[in-house]
Amino acid sequence: MNIRPELNIRVNNCRTDIFVLSGVLKIYYLMSMRKSEWLLIYYLLSDKRNPNKTIRQLAEETGLSLGSVHAAVKKLQDQGFLIENNGLTILRKRSTLIESWANAYTQIKPKYFISRFTFLSQQVRAQWQNIALPCTLSWGGEPAANILDGYIQPEQWDIYTADNADTLIATGRMIPSPSGEIHVYKRFWQTDGTPLIVVYADLLSTNDDRCREAAERLKPML
């Protein structure tokens, strides 16, 4: 299934993607995001408790400045994503915000790129799931989606690292290659493993119909 938008327009400085799926009109209001806004939105989406934290707590836990967090929170409030209800802050329109975040990641992801590797042999590539990755490494994109539901067979392998790329060499299964099928990125989160929303965004960033179909299969899990 191809889920590319039928039309792109801008409303109040927000990109609006219009989709027609199975005869149903779907509109996603996709915010134009700065990197600081994008990081804060990831943090808000990652834990339902986070929207109720103070500006200072959000700044300390994300590493962003107080000014950046304040501006991002205000923007989310103005666009109706954060509302106050009986003393609690509620994150609304979560699915729309996820789409917005994932689309913004397409532009931001290259900034986290480190290098490319290849598998030591075709046999190692065929048995990539048997590679024991240390906790500082985790699969993203196509291999992560394959592990989650087995639907897609990887043609490109994304790996996220909390260290440097030399950690891949230590596995004894991968070597540096400027044209390799393994793309290595720096983690921007603190926990082990690759968050589902990142896997989803990885798949959307490829403009590959196989990957977009795999992303649609993961969407109910988000």
Image (cartoon, rainbow, N blue to C red):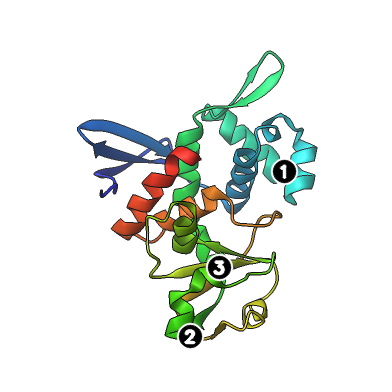
Q: Secondary structure under badge 2? A: loop
Question: Residue most toward the left?
Answer: 23
Q: Would you say the residues marked 1 and 3 are in contact, meaning their CB atoms lie under 8 Å apart?
A: no
Count residues near mark 2 (Cα–Cα under 10 Å), then give few for <14, some for 14-19, many for 20+.
Answer: few
Q: Which numbered disc flags the more N-terminal residue, 2 or 3?
A: 3
Q: From the viewer's perspective, is 22 left or right of 168?
A: left
Give the residue pinned by disc 1: 67
- Label 1 sits on what residue type? Gly
Give the residue pinned by disc 3: 159
- Calculate the distance from the C-alpha at mark 1 to the C-alpha at mark 2: 40 Å
Give the residue pinned by disc 2: 178
Count residues near mark 3 (Cα–Cα under 10 Å), then give few for <14, some for 14-19, many for 20+.
Answer: many
Q: From the viewer's perspective, is 23 left or right of 211?
A: left
Camera-side residue: 37 or 19? 19
> x and y percent of residue 85 in the render?
64, 16
- Label 2 sits on what residue type? Pro
Q: Secondary structure under badge 3? A: strand
Q: Which numbered disc flags the more N-terminal residue, 1 or 3?
A: 1
> x and y percent of residue 95 in the render?
46, 35
- Calculate the distance from the C-alpha at mark 2 to the C-alpha at mark 3: 15 Å
Q: Secondary structure under badge 1? A: helix
Camera-side residue: 218 or 28? 218
